[in-house]
Image (cartoon, helix red, strand yellow):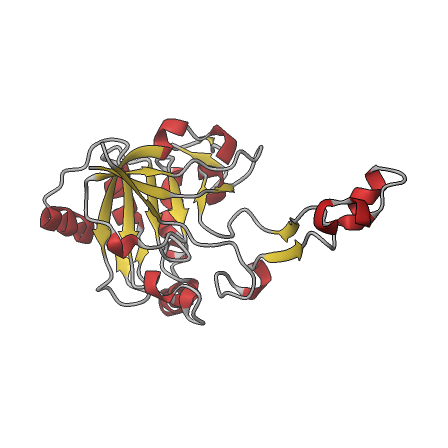
Amino acid sequence: MARKIIDISVYLENDVVSDPPIYRPKIEYINHKMSVPELLGFFPGLEQKDLPDEEAWAIEKIELITHNGTHLDAPYHFASTMNGGERAMTIDEVPLDWCFQPGVKLDFRHFDDGYVVTAADVAAELDRIGHVLSPLEIVVVNTAAGKRYGRDDYVTAGCGMGYDATMYLLERGVRLTGTDGWSWDAPFVHTRQRYEETGDAGLIWEGHKAGRDIGYCHLEKLHNLEVLPATGFMISCFPVKIRGASAGWTRAVAIFDN
């Protein structure tokens, strides 16, 4: 059986608009020549000329937050509790079977930047693609932000998933979702405007906060979703195991068995 794997993750890299400036990753590259003094320090009497090609190793020193790059958010990121009062799971506690399941793609690229997706929008898209959700399917949303990754407007681009839209998925047994936007919710610049107009704090991070009622995870900063069909593939997105953390980096991929 032929198997096809499509990478749906972004790079961790310098000098790309992937996050607000205060949160961007910093990677220092140490090459084979730069590391020679470190290697010589392990072996008294060793000289650089004794090494093959006079080289040691290449390593990288990286300053990250757990939400850089393509990552999986744990319920603990959203709130201290989930499922109506239970202690929220951290990333090392997320069930691994949530992270390898059939995928479903919802195409919301036509929605304006800042639009808050509703339950009716989700139902209409599922009807369009002719799919009925099953428990534990991984639902990813393709937004207008996907094609703007790395551009100056990336963190303000794309629609976001509202509380009702998120609960529509969770009430049908979905426990892991994802977006190619910077956030599962609408970008803050748009939410700020709505908050200023209404004074309603419930609009802030409303999709994330659905996790207080039903615990779930979501992927952020996915990539390449436009090449995926609506169904017919698996998603693998196992997170790095960081004790007590709110998120973990993942090399998310879509897998097709032809």
Give the tally of numbered discs.
0
Q: Nearer the viewer, residue 62 or 211?
A: 62
Q: Position of residue 32 (x, y in %)?
A: 69, 51
Which residue is at 29% across, 47% downward? 140
- Whether residue 97 appears in this view of the structure is yes
Give the image location of residue 157, x and y in percent.
Answer: 36, 66
As drawn, is 155 to the left or to the right of 227? right
Q: Is residue 90 visible?
A: no
Instruction: Quadrant for residue 136, please give it.
Output: top left
Residue at the spot 12% in from the left edge and 48% down from the top edge: 129
Measured along the vertical axis of the image, is residue 118 above or below residue 82? below
Residue 94 lies, with reference to residue 11, above or below; the image says above
Q: Closer to the camera, 49 or 77?
A: 49
Q: Is residue 199 left or right of residue 172?
A: right
- For this view, does 63 lie left or right of residue 241? right
From what the image shows, is residue 13 above or below residue 103? Answer: below
Quadrant in the rendering for residue 218: top left
- Percent across and percent down for residue 114 are 33, 65
Q: Quadrant of residue 3?
A: top left
Image quadrant in which the C terminus is located: top left
Answer left or right for 176 relative to 38. left
Residue found at the far bottom of this picture: 152
Quarter of the figure that contains the N terminus? top left
Q: In the displayed image of the protein, which residue is found farthest to the right?
A: 45
- 155 vs 54, nearest the viewer: 54
Residue 221 location (% of width, % of height): 41, 53
At x 47%, y 41%, the residue is 79
